[in-house]
Amino acid sequence: MDDSYLKLQQLHDSMVNMTKTIESLENSILETLKENTELKMENELLREKMDKMSNAHQSTVKTQSGLESLRKIYNTGYHICNMYYGSHRDPSSDCMFCLDILDNFGEKKKTR
């Protein structure tokens, strides 16, 4: 009978240790899940920030390539202003409307 009580006590102690281990594992898992959620949110914010930076860079590149296209058209002897757009321009004289567009191209976009 004494032996049975000892075995029961050992089993009880074993279960208490197992319960403590399970609680410790649960806490560890909860901390890992919390950290994972925080990292997912941070990752999403960083992706959004990178997308914004990428879009800003792409619009700058597009603006610069658009400006270069307008310069080429103007330098080949055509008007780019709304007054005379597409008509031939005397290459020996400049058009103040076209030059105004070339000088201010992209400035309005930047201030928006």
Image: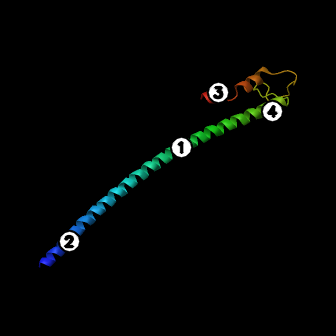
Q: Which residue is mark 3?
A: 108
Q: Position of residue 23 (x, y in %)?
A: 29, 60
- Mark 4 or 2: in front is 2
Quarter of the C terminus within the rendering? top right
Q: Amino acid at mark 4?
A: Lys
Q: Nearer the viewer, residue 107 or 78?
A: 107
Q: Is residue 97 left or right of residue 14?
A: right
Identify the mark nearer the N-term, 2 or 1: 2
Identify the residue position indicated by label 2 in the image. Answer: 10
Above/below status of 72 relative to 37: above
Query: Image quadrant of residue 100?
Result: top right
- Disc 3 or 1, which lies upstream in sequence? 1
Query: Would you say 39 lies left or right of 66 here?
Result: left
Q: Nearer the viewer, mark 2 or mark 3?
A: 2
User: Mark 4 and mark 2: span between their CA atoms?
Assistant: 91 Å
Q: Nearer the viewer, mark 1 or mark 4?
A: 1
Numbered circle sitting on residue 72: 4
Under tag 1, what secondary structure?
helix
Q: Residue 48 — which label?
A: 1
Q: CA distance from mark 3 to mark 1?
A: 25 Å
What is the secondary structure assignment of the residue under circle 3?
helix
Between disc 4 and disc 2, whose residue precedes? 2
Nearer mark to the viewer, of 3 and 1: 1
Q: Amino acid at mark 1?
A: Glu
